[in-house]
Image (cartoon, rainbow, N blue to C red):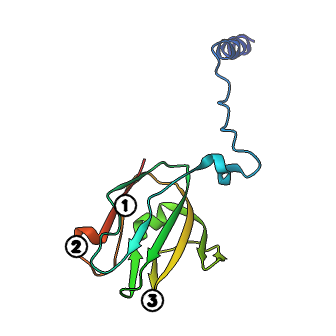
């Protein structure tokens, strides 16, 4: 009986201090895929001798992003970043209007000029990168931080 009274008193104390479950973000019918949970991300350009991006990119965990990759056709170029691709959940990849919903990615490649969009949810905080395979130049690599 004594333990029941103590448990009831603790429950009432917790309620009085507002120890109720935190309210979830109001995403809407689409959940985390809703427009209110998305942010812009700088474009990445694949071109021989030009930097991939303006500088480092910072993302927020739990937010949806659309990565636009544009290749100008000056060379057969790709992007690799297995660490980055394992730290995100890929919703879809759009190439020439065709939507692909893969389990995951490790790299992408352009044999000619074109555009690709990768819509993803940033998940695992950390330091990552995307780079042109086989390259060693700093401009051929973009640092990505997920906070």
Residue at label 2? 137
Q: What x and y, as percent, mark residue 103?
A: 60, 72
Residue at image location 35% in from the left, 64% down from the top: 53
First in sequence, mark 3 or 1: give its number: 3
Residue at image location 40% in from the left, 80% down from the top: 78
Q: Secondary structure at mark 1?
A: strand
First in sequence, mark 2 or 3: give its number: 3
Q: Is residue 120 above or below residue 21?
A: below
Q: Secondary structure at mark 2?
A: loop
Residue at image location 47% in from the left, 67% down from the top: 85
Quadrant (top left, top right, bottom left, bottom right) of the N terminus: top right
Quarter of the figure with residue 102? bottom right
Residue at image location 40% in from the left, 76% down from the top: 79
Q: Sort mark 2 into few (<14), some (14-19) or many (20+) by Cα contacts within 10 Å.
A: few
Please report contact status of discs 2 and 3: CB closer than 8 Å, yes or no: no
Query: Which disc is residue 111 wearing?
Result: 3
Q: What x and y, as percent, mark residue 129?
A: 35, 64
Is residue 96 shown left or right of residue 68? right
Q: CA distance from mark 2 to mark 1?
A: 16 Å
Q: Secondary structure at mark 3?
A: loop
Please report contact status of discs 2 and 1: CB closer than 8 Å, yes or no: no
- In the foreground, 135 or 21: 135
Q: Is residue 107 above or below residue 124?
A: below
Is residue 72 shown left or right of residue 36? left
Quarter of the figure with residue 21? top right
Q: CA distance from mark 3 to mark 1?
A: 25 Å
- In the foreground, 135 or 111: 111
Residue at label 1? 128
Is residue 95 shown left or right of residue 81? right
Q: CA distance from mark 2 to mark 3?
A: 21 Å
Quarter of the figure with residue 77? bottom left
């Amino acid at each position: 009986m004594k333990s029941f009274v103590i448990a009831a008193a603790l429950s009432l104390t917790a309620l009085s201090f507002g120890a109720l479950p935190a309210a979830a973000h109001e995403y809407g019918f689409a959940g985390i895929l809703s427009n209110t949970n998305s942010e812009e991300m700088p474009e990445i350009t694949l071109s021989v001798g030009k930097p991939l991006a303006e500088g480092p990119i910072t993302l927020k965990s739990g937010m949806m992003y659309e990565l636009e990759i544009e290749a100008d056709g000056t060379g057969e170029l790709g992007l690799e970043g297995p660490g980055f691709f394992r730290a995100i959940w890929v919703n879809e990849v759009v190439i020439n209007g065709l939507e692909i919903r893969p389990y995951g990615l490790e790299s992408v490649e352009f044999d000619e000029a074109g555009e690709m969009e990768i819509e993803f949810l940033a998940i695992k905080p950390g330091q990552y990168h995307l780079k042109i395979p086989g390259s060693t130049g700093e401009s051929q690599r973009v640092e990505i931080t997920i906070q």
